[in-house]
Image: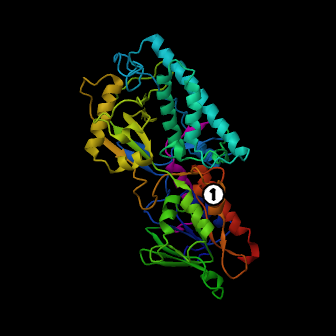
Amino acid sequence: FFSSMAEPQVIVVGAGLAGIAAALELQRKNVVVVVLEARDVAGGRVRSASLASTKVDMGAHWLHGTEGNPLWDMAQDLQLVQQPLVKPDLVSVSRLPGYGDDGLGDHFYTDGMPHDLLHHVYDAEAQAFEFFDGVLEECDAVARKGCQQEEESLGEYMCKRQKQFLEQRPDCVLMQRIFAWRERMEQLTVGCGSLKEVSVSAWGCYEELDGDDVPLIEFHAIVRHLLGQLTEGTVKYGHEVCQVVWNTCAEKPDNEGCRVVCSNGTVHSAQSIIVTTPLGVLKQWIDPDPDRGVFVPPLPNPKTLAIQQLGAGCVAKLFLLFETVFWKGPAEGRGTGISLLWDPGEGHDPCIPQWMRSGKAFEPHASGEPILEFWVTGSAAMDLETAAEEDIVDACMYVLGRSTGFEDVCLPRPVQILRTAWASSAHSKGGYTFIPAGVPAQAIDSLASPLPDSSGNGQFRLQFAGEATHPKYYSTAHGAYCSGIREAQRWLSQGSSV
């Protein structure tokens, strides 16, 4: 046991999963550490909120793979595991004959569709998904063979292959709509606004863990579990970092080798600093203006370039709480979601804002409460964050009415809505990381590499953790957690030098 008042050996910036994991690993080796957190709560982009009597995840919600995932055992022990959600239906309200070139209407839902048409859409969906996933495997192969295709994005490659596929299909209009839906699904997974932003040559660098993708009941419970293992007082809340001085002159004693200045006026000194802030925040911190840049001295060019090049995507969630459920239950063992297969050739309906057209589905919340979730990415996410609440509700009710065949019925409006604000928040400035087209996968390694001081003793003064620094598991919660442990072990590996 050591006092929280002792001079820290390591300062960790950020109390997300990476920061907490780093601090825990260091404390287990009796290293004195302090964690500086800008917000009044830990977790970073893992956050829950209350909607009526239900907890909803505003940030991370899924465990991506179970085998080899260090968060999986925690989730099981904490009884956070729920059954994987069944994908929502891709079928339409059949009573809109002739609406759209394929006669299927604008939005897809099972209620009332003739049996033969229902199975036609299911079959088309299965074939489109099989083809789409096969193309993603092709992209994996491109990356693993080291083929350089910097000028071709994932979206361009996908478009080229889809065109070849659709030329052989008599139902190409329906297929186009299903492909567009599947692309929006992939955009949510990647965190980009368009697959044309994403690198093909780096696509296979991300590694999927074996096992299911599993939604948790409340992801933030893992954060609370980990926090409970830290020494009391380790995390300093309300400590927004405004300056990181990481390379002082070599004559300074080790315990004054680095310092962090916070906006509340506090100054913290230590041997080393581990920065775990999101990529979007790092982009703000490397401002070339010395009066606005956070790092002193400025970071070396390779690291600055990596921060500039990597993509900090944006994902927004919208939760609609109703008094009762008005949507139908599952049909033929399929999901209960209301999927939206927009007609790509249709003129713009003024009642449907562009941000809504970037979404793929209204999905019932796993709690069983009368809550629908709606996710969007990219510029649509930023538009959703800033839209007026009344406009959001109007657009949702208009689309839900048409999607469920109840547009002539006065559907109950939601009694409450919640939406995220990850892009506009000063402490996140976006969602999770992706590798853009034209950017080498090695950019993540450049971001993750530690920086020694100028004394020549090789001691690491500044280290980086967080999901953006994991070369295999970037964009994931387990990637963030593992990166924190990695940097703690890297610091410990210096042995007698520290």
Q: Residue furthest right?
A: 496
Say few, some or many: other residues with alpha carbon within 10 Å of mark 1 (under 14 / 14 to 19 / 20 or more). many
Q: Is residue 217 magenta?
A: yes
Q: Residue at x 58, y 42 (%)?
A: 154
Residue 20: quarter of image: bottom right
Work out whether residue 419 can be spotted. yes
Q: What element carries label 1?
A: helix
Q: In this view, does 186 lie to the left or right of 384?
A: right
Q: In this picture, is 400 found above or below 114? A: below
Residue 303: quarter of image: bottom right
Q: Residue at x 45, y 22 (%)?
A: 330
Q: Position of residue 10 (x, y in %)?
A: 61, 72
On-image quarter of the N terminus: bottom right
Q: In this picture, is 227 found above or below 222? A: below
Q: Mark 1 points at which residue?
A: 444
Q: Is residue 98 left or right of residue 465?
A: left
Q: Residue at x 35, y 29 (%)?
A: 325
Highlighted range, magenta: 212-236
Q: Does the magenta stretch include residue 478?
A: no
Q: Where is residue 431 in the image (x, y as percent from the top left)?
A: 49, 52
